[in-house]
Image (cartoon, rainbow, N blue to C red):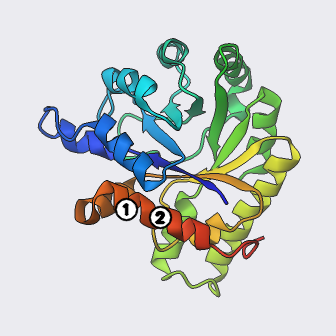
Amino acid sequence: MPHLGVNIDHVATLRQARRGAEPDVVRAAHEAELGGADCITVHLREDRRHVVDEDVLRLRPFVSVKLNLEMAATDEMVRIARDVQPHMVTLVPEGRAEITTEGGLNIVKQLSRMKDVVTALEDVGMVTSAFIEHDPKQIDAAAECGFNACEIHTGPYAHIFAHNGGDFLHEGLKRERDAIADAGFRIIERGMRFNAGHGLNYHNVQPIACMTGIAELHIGHSIVSRAVYTGLREAVREMKRLIELAPAGRAS
């Protein structure tokens, strides 16, 4: 069964709306763990629009499960990661004007830089993951750089799913799901972990969760949104149940 990484960025978004102390991301991490989260994810953006440096520092000794730090491959972020030493770092592209991450990391165009960053992070014991599209060239480049994992960007899948009501007879949705599954096989063949995330929710998660070899699903906005009504602990439990019940091999 895939592990569930819960992204708590938008707990910090709510806090930053008033620049106050509530809701506290550390308490949110605790609630997510009690709900069954296998990993806590935060994205420390260059503009600090939600999660801030202090959050990452406070979370590192507190989190009992894996702490995954999403970040851009900048010198500043590499320094912070080496100081804090989360269990895993996921390198993502970052645009100042974007509302959320809009696409995968282009490793092919910055191969030398990615190799240097991966070496700098793995030298101090961190697992490294690349957030990429399901492009075979990007997967091969990630393997060449020495990444331990690839997280496939599921945003396009989620968009098509919502637009077509989850109808897998729709050729576009079937094609996108199959492309993610094929990417998973390629990732595993190259000795990396197959992770996935972005735009996954309570309606579209199971066809991804049942893919052969998938190791982790990273989900944030839909869980935090559900938590407004149910509480974070129960929102995480509900997502875990869906992942556990995903029929094995259905999408392979």
Residue at 29%, 39% in the rendered image: 27
Q: Is residue 39 left or right of residue 233?
A: right
Q: Badge 2: few (under 14), some or many (20 or more) residues near its Cα, within 10 Å?
A: many
Tell me the distance, in whole angstroms, between the alpha carbons under discs 2 and 1.
Answer: 6 Å
* Residue toward you, 66 or 203: 66
Q: Is residue 1 left or right of residue 25?
A: right
* Residue toward you, 137 or 235: 235
**Element type where label 1 sits in the image:** helix
Three-letter amino acid code at disc 1?
Ala
* Residue toward you, 80 or 25: 25
Residue at 79%, 48% in the rendered image: 187
Corner quadrant of residue 82:
top right
Please tell me the numbered disc located at residue 235. Answer: 1
Please tell me the numbered disc located at residue 46. Answer: none
Q: Are marks 2 and 1 in contact (CB under 8 Å)?
A: yes
Q: Residue 12, relative to residue 71: is it above or below?
A: below
**Element type where label 2 sits in the image:** helix
Measured as percent of width and height from the top left, residue 52 is found at 32, 26
- Report the residue marked by disc 2: 239
Q: Badge 1: few (under 14), some or many (20 or more) residues near its Cα, within 10 Å?
A: many
Q: Residue 122, relative to residue 239: is it above or below?
A: above
Single out the residue that lies furthest toward the right: 189
Three-letter amino acid code at disc 2?
Met
Residue at 51%, 28% in the rendered image: 72
Q: Is residue 207 left or right of residue 219?
A: right
